[in-house]
Image (spheres, helix red, strand yellow):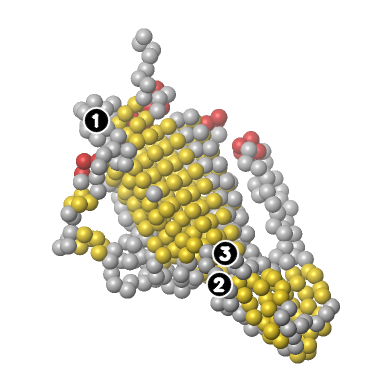
Amino acid sequence: MSSIRKPYVTATLQGPDDGGDFGPHTPGTKTSGLQEAVHFAHEQCRDLHIWGGRGGLHDGEGLPHNVYYLDEPLYIPWSQDFTLGGGNYVLAYRGETGSAIHIDSQMNCRYKFGLISSSSPDPVVNIRPETPGPDDFTVITASLFDFSAIVSQHPKGVGLVLDSSHGPIINSTFFAEETNSTGTGVYLTDAGGEGYPLSNNTLRIPYGNQYHARGDCTGLRLGDPGTKKILHNMFEMSYHAPRGAYFDPDKKAYVTMDAYVAENAIGADIFAQSNFLTLSCYGKRQPGEDLIFEAEAKDNTIHALSLPNGITNRAHTPTNKVVYNKAIGFAVETPSFPSSDAWHVNTTSMTVQVLITSPGKVTTWTLRDAGETVALKPYNLSLVDTLNYPPRLLMPDGQAQDQEIKSGLYPGQIFILDPGEAVKFTYDDLPCWRWKAMR
């Protein structure tokens, strides 16, 4: 009978004095007993439950009875077929540097954390596989990560990081009810294209809170210069612009500044390719700072429920597409008609109808598509292929193809340009056009 183990491991808010296996009274602990609980659960091959309780801020005072304090980072070692469950406790990291939590390789695991806070300049939650473990791979795959909230109180800090520098992060789901950040809320990195695939994941953040920021902040940073392995992920996120929020000790409440518009306060900053985002931005930002497509960004599709401050398009291959929830119609900017034999590229990030209002004297006009992006990058997400075989050489993207029409134009003629497509005209007398955004 001595070989029979408990069916589960518990960490409690006054453990082990209150009957839990581990907790703040664990001898010698620097993590309120949580690191000891995680290691014990792994050694015993048992799941772990971290108990929580009611908390929050009331009448200007915090309720301290659901808080686990961390004086060093909590390390979640590699695991497989493991569950860490729990309530809505608070993990308060008190270190000046380092992450509150570092999560290593995982396969077929489920994690439920409470609210995690930190004032360190390093990521609050750092999901970065580094150690060979599940099936002897360095990987995060087929796992689910759930957070009540992730709070980064440092202006250079980051709430949630997914970092594939040392191993793939694939086929997994990440959810946080809220990210509350003064720097960056969510950051995905493949080490500027030098890391491993970060692909086929789902990320959902219903409330991206930037109210406390004072500028130089980003809700979602999707990649870096050189990024090429952050592909085929799905995002559902909202980002709420900075309002200079601060705690007023006299009012015993958080207050916001009137008519506050921060500088360089970005909703989503995208470097990656071929991702799908449902995005809402709220509040006032500088023009064009709800959404930015950086030079590397292409083939991303954005379903925009609300982008009141507009977008900035720096993409070298402007095939990113924004589908607005509202009608744009003729409100899309109509560019000047191009010079004879000069290409004009649709850089609006919208599919547009081009209406000819005056035909001029055109002899020939030519449509050009955006070129073909190589599909199936990566070819698959098998761990055997991803990790054990040498990288496969990819064919270059297909060149753009032209279709020449040896004819003039007529009033009322309509043709369509998708993002990144182009048109040119050979003419003697200048035609006129009007652009209309399609939904």
Q: Are marks 2 and 3 in contact (CB under 8 Å)?
A: no
The residue carrying pointer 1 sits among few (fewer than 14), some (14 to 19) or many (20 or more) residues within 10 Å by Cα, namely some
Pick the quarter of the image with the N terminus: top left
* C-alpha gap between disc 2 and disc 3: 11 Å
Q: Is tag 1's residue or tag 3's residue first in the polypeptide sequence?
A: 1
State the SS at label 3: strand
- Foreground: 273 or 325? 325
Q: Which residue is mark 2?
A: 328
Q: Quadrant of residue 435?
A: bottom right
Q: Nearer the viewer, mark 2 or mark 3?
A: 2
Which residue is the extreme one toward the right?
406
Q: Measured from the top left, where is residue 205 in percent x and y?
A: 43, 52
Displayed quadrant of residue 102: top left
Residue 347 seen: no
How far is the residue under mark 2 from the one under mark 1? 58 Å
Q: Earlier in the sequence, mark 2 or mark 1?
A: 1
Residue found 65% across the figure and 42% down from its top? 380
Residue 315 percent coordinates (x, y): 59, 66
Residue type at mark 2?
A: Ile
Give the residue furthest to the bottom: 429
Tell me where residue 378 appears, x and y as whole percent.
65, 47
Q: Residue at coordinates 72% horizontally, 73% vertically from top-left? A: 415
Find disc 1 in the rendering and name its residue: 15
Q: Is residue 324 above or below residue 363?
A: above
Q: Nearer the viewer, mark 2 or mark 1?
A: 2
Identify the image quadrant of residue 23.
Answer: top left
* Farthest-out residue, left: 250
The residue that appears at 78% across and 88% down in the rendered structure is: 361
Q: Pointer 3: what residue?
A: 322
58 relative to 244 in the view: left or right:
left
